[in-house]
Structures are given as structure tokens and as C-alpha cells.
Image (tube, grey):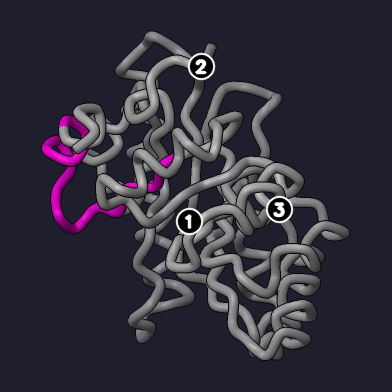
Amino acid sequence: MNQNVLKVLSEIPDDVKLIAVTKKRSVSEILDVYHSGIKDFGENRVQELLQKQPLLPSDVKWHLIGHLQTNKVKYIASFIHLIHSVDSLKLLLEINNQAKRCNRTIDCLLQVYIAKEETKFGLDTDELDTILSSSVLKDLQNIRITGLMGMATFSDDLNLIRSEFRSLKSIFNQIKSTYFIDNNYFTQISMGMSSDYHIAIEEGSTIVRIGTALFGKRD
């Protein structure tokens, strides 16, 4: 078994989902991780996802973890397992439309802006409330909002990273109690990458998105 995979799996509790981030990784690299038992893979870009998806086993669960444009949803709607990066009601509407066309329901996470970096995408708490209280949302039968996603600041300041993850968990608790109190599938918090997944898990992450720690540094 791939030693990197073994190491990471040994550090992740059974109730935390590991997603292998395959950005700029070759099919042979991905297959090596797949044969070590990982079936969940995350891509940042639709174009790269579409190139790899037909070349990998059919039981792979694909996650879209990067920014998603509405005009790209139709290309992944037939097979995507979870979209982590939903940041507008317009995008939710399009995901619903394309999921309906494919006769399926697509699970989504709402991306929350928690970092001190303007290059990151995501919703603030007012925007979250606007989406979740929208009358339009109730009519979307082909999506399920199953949780939240966030990316911490790219920083060596571990206290800053911890505080950002803690804030996402706090927002999750607030959203759950306000909008999903009787709901049994709003359960996911996607936070933590190779450099900070230990902290993310301590602060309540249920999904970690790991690339470098599994595959090694990119050439």
C-alpha cells in the first residue's frame, strides 16, 4: 500500500472522510492512491475533471472542490458526487436544473468565506441567510444542501488557522439550528488540507481535502 496514504489514514478518525485532491496529478498517480483504498477524489477545475473521469474506475466518487461557473455545471451533473464550492443562489438553481435533466439529486456544500485573503471565494453569514431563507430554495427538489465548506488563510500562523476553522464550525452550528434542525443530512463540514488537516479535524471537520500529503510535492 502507498505509504503516504497509510500515514494519512492513520491520522484521520473513521468518521472523517478523506478526499484525495488530484489537481495536476497523472492518471497513474491517481490509480496508485485508488488501489490503496481511496475512492473519493476532488478536482478544482471542471476541464481537468472531464479529462480524468472517463479514464478512472466507475466506482470513483468525484468531488468538485474549486470555484464552479454556472455554464460548466451541465458537464458534470450526470456523475458528480458532491459539489463543495456553491457560493450563490444562481449556481444552486443551475445545479438543480441540470440534476433534474439527469434525473438525479446532487449534494452540495455552501462555501463560506473564512480566510483573511481576498482571492478566496465564499459567502458571508448575511449571504448564507439570504440563500437559506429564500422562498426559491424550497422549490429545488434536485439538490440537497448537506453542509458547509471553507478554506483557511494560507499562513504559518496556526492560531489564525484554528480560529478560522472554529468560526466555520460555529457558523455550521448556527445554520443547522436555524434552518436544518429537523434535518438528518445537513452534517458535513469540509475543511482542512495537507498543511492544516490535523487542526481542522480537532475543530470539527468531517471532510478533509488532501493532495500533497498523499501524492507528494508536484514536479
Quadrant of the rendered structure where residue 26 is?
Answer: top right
**Nearest to viewer (mark 2 / mark 1):** 2
Distance from label 2 to label 1 (Cα)?
A: 28 Å
- Residue in the picture at 76% in, 46% down: 47
Where does the image place residue 197, in percent across and percent down from the top left? 30, 32
Element at badge 1?
A: strand
Q: Which mark is residue 50?
A: 3
Quadrant including the N terminus:
top left
Asked if residue 128 is among those painted magenta in the image, a careful observer would answer no
Provide the residue designation for mark 1: 148
Q: Looking at the image, is 169 positioned above or below residue 101?
A: above
Where does the image place residue 68, in percent across and percent down from the top left? 73, 51
**Which sits in the foreground, 124 or 218?**
218
**Which sits in the foreground, 68 or 172?**
68
Type of the residue with mark 1: Leu
- Residue in the picture at 36% in, 48% down: 34
**Which sits in the foreground, 209 or 79?**
79
Where does the image place residue 41, in percent across and percent down from the top left? 46, 49
**Which sits in the foreground, 89 or 82?**
82
Q: Which residues are magenta?
A: 7-20
Provide the residue designation for mark 2: 218
Q: Earlier in the sequence, mark 2 or mark 3?
A: 3
